[in-house]
Image (tube, helix red, strand yellow):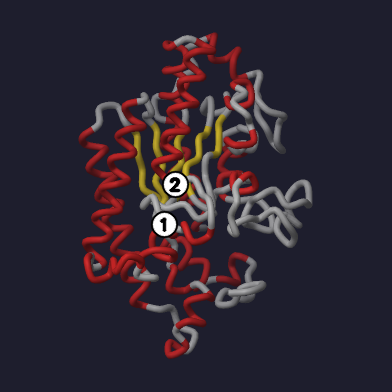
């Protein structure tokens, strides 16, 4: 199964060279948030940190002035609490499942923690719906926390860890933790495809993709400088198959919009290449690229196998 393949790659990454070598770390992480279902007292890694957009936002935008909010029904109706949490889903989101597979509790959102180190010790979710690799992507929706701003929040978190635990223990914790990055969709939906600032004239798709990949590369290097060593970079799903674009391009007769999917495939190629370059350049880093495009296509083309009846229409709206 496609999702299982992503999980396997993810678990292989975080298992490499992981040892709980510090008694101080063991003591510190035992003081984390309330356990989630299937929570383990012996997690595979100390913590999971999440950077991204609405695909992994678990409540950040509840604290922002924005139209991109998921704090009302039908969001959350199938979640563990059966209440809206800020997740853009009727139930759990991918990083919830990943956290559980790692033996960790659900990762809380940064803005809801008010800087409490004991609540951040098993991980933090910085993701914000509407955010993009480009600072202004999604700005027409209202407030959001961009990639650069999320990286700064990560740095602030590390500083709090250092003050609380000491530099050696904090650095060890960060180096053994996993950082999951899922971003880029809004740079198309709310920037390139809308031709903001006449970007399509200035940048052909391939050049735009290179710009995004190099920007992401720079931010991952910033994480590396903070002693981050385990990174998962998610590719983009086939946006040209989204119900909204099937409606926008009726001439496709319900087929995926190749023009958009071709741009996304090129984006994924650039991101994969960027990840491979970092794996060669950065000493001690364990970084992988997860192909969300092919996994999503597998679900759409074999929807019966995954329990879906309809894959070309949304439950509501577009």
Q: Is residue 17 above or below residue 137?
A: above
Q: Residues within 10 Å of mark 2 (few under 14, many from 20)?
A: many
Q: Secondary structure at mark 2?
A: loop
Q: Residue furthest right?
A: 82
Q: Residue at the spot x=66%, y=73% of the render? A: 316
The residue shown at (46%, 23%) is: 158
Question: Disc 2 designates what residue?
Answer: 146
Residue 268 in the figure: left or right of residue 108 = left
Residue 269 bears which disc, if any? none
Q: Please determine whether, in this image, residue 240 is positioned above or below residue 68.
A: below
Residue labelled with disc 1: 137
Residue drawn at x 36%, y 66% as measured from the top left: 196
Q: How many angstroms separate mark 2 from mark 1 (CA)?
A: 8 Å
Lateral position of residue 111 relative to residue 192, left or right: right
> Do the residues under discs 2 and 1 have CB atoms within 8 angstroms?
yes
Residue in view at x 59 percent, y 15 percent: 28
Q: Earlier in the sequence, mark 2 or mark 1?
A: 1
Relative to the observer, which residue lies in front, 213 or 159? 159
Image location of residue 37, percent across then percent down: 72, 38
- Determine which quarter of the picture holds residue 252: bottom left
Please state the horizontal and vertical placement of residue 72, each as a whole percent of the image. Answer: 73, 57
The percent coordinates of residue 82 (x first, y second) are 78, 52
């Amino acid at each position: 199964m496609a999702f299982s393949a992503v999980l396997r790659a993810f678990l292989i990454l975080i298992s490499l060279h992981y040892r709980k070598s510090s008694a101080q770390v063991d003591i510190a992480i035992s003081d984390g948030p309330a356990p989630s279902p299937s929570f383990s007292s012996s997690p595979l890694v100390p913590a999971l940190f999440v950077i991204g957009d609405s695909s992994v936002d678990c409540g950040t935008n509840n604290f922002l002035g924005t139209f991109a909010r998921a704090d009302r029904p039908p969001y959350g109706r199938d979640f563990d609490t059966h209440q809206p949490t800020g997740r853009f889903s009727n139930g759990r989101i991918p990083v919830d499942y990943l956290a559980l597979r790692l033996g960790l509790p659900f990762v809380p959102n940064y803005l809801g923690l008010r800087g409490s180190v004991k609540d951040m010790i098993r991980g933090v979710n910085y993701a914000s719906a509407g955010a993009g690799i480009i600072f202004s992507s999604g700005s027409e929706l209202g407030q959001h926390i961009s990639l650069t701003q999320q990286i700064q929040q990560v740095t602030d978190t590390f500083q709090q860890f250092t003050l609380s635990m000491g530099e050696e223990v904090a650095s060890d914790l960060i180096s053994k933790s996993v950082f999951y990055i899922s971003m880029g969709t809004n740079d198309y939906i709310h920037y390139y495809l809308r031709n903001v600032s006449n970007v399509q004239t200035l940048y052909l798709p391939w050049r735009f993709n290179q710009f995004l990949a190099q920007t992401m590369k720079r931010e991952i290097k910033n994480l590396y400088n903070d002693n981050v060593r385990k990174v998962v970079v998610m590719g983009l799903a086939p946006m040209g198959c989204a119900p909204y674009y099937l409606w926008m391009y009726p001439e496709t007769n319900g087929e995926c919009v190749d023009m958009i999917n071709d741009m996304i495939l090129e984006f994924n190629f650039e991101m994969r290449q960027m990840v491979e370059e970092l794996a060669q350049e950065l000493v001690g880093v364990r970084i992988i690229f997860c192909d969300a495009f092919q996994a999503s296509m597998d679900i759409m083309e074999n929807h019966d196998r995954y329990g879906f009846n309809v894959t070309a229409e949304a439950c509501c709206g577009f």
